[in-house]
Amino acid sequence: MGEDSLLRILEMQEERFYKIAYAYLRNEQDALDAYQELVYRALKHGHKVREPAFMTTWLVRVLINICLDMKKKQQTTITLDAVQEPAKYDTSTVELSELLAQLSPAEQELIYLKYVEDLKNQDIAVRQNIPEGTVKSRIHTTLRKLRSFWKEERG
């Protein structure tokens, strides 16, 4: 795939990639940094993707890996920006973000694929290389866990 085609995909999917990054990082500047790193890595390594049809899937996976790496770094050092960031969203959004943050990265990815990307269980199974029944049970278990977290928060 040529550089022009790759840049066109990145431009067309920019908002989607930003939303993915923000869902993981919960910080506007970090999400923008993750997108910028995605563009860099895509231009550097995008030629390695053998099937152009899988380019967007590859880009999403690279972005998720970037976000997970950034989260690991954030856990080891607390930045002043994170402490002082003002609340920009209503409390229900913040509350949901806090509940989602309690999930493992794998559970967060599953919820993201199902409810943000709006993928069918079969598509998630193919993407994660697991049986569809496993996807269903993991979604069920993860939603039960979220309900439990929510009930604990409510008292």
Image (tube, rainbow, N blue to C red):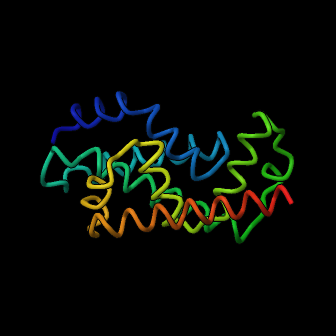
Residue 64, x across and y down, in percent = 45, 56
Residue at 37% x, 49% y is 60
**Which of the two residues, 86 or 113, is positioned nearer the viewer here?**
113
Task: Specify the farthest residue to the left.
Answer: 51
Using the image, determine if residue 97 lies above or below residue 68: above
Residue 87, x across and y down, in percent = 82, 38
How many numbered discs? 0
Relative to residue 48, is residue 11 drawn left or right?
Answer: right
**Quarter holding residue 33:** top right
Quarter of the picture containing the N terminus is top left
Residue at 75% x, 34% y is 89
Using the image, determine if residue 113 lies above or below residue 10: below
**Which of the two residues, 116 or 49, is positioned nearer the viewer here?**
116
Residue 39, x across and y down, in percent = 40, 43
Residue 90, x across and y down, in percent = 78, 34
Residue at 23% x, 31% y is 4
Residue at 29% x, 33% y is 9
Quarter of the picture containing the C terminus is bottom right
Using the image, determine if residue 13 lies above or below residue 30: above
Relative to residue 64, is residue 129 drawn left or right?
Answer: left
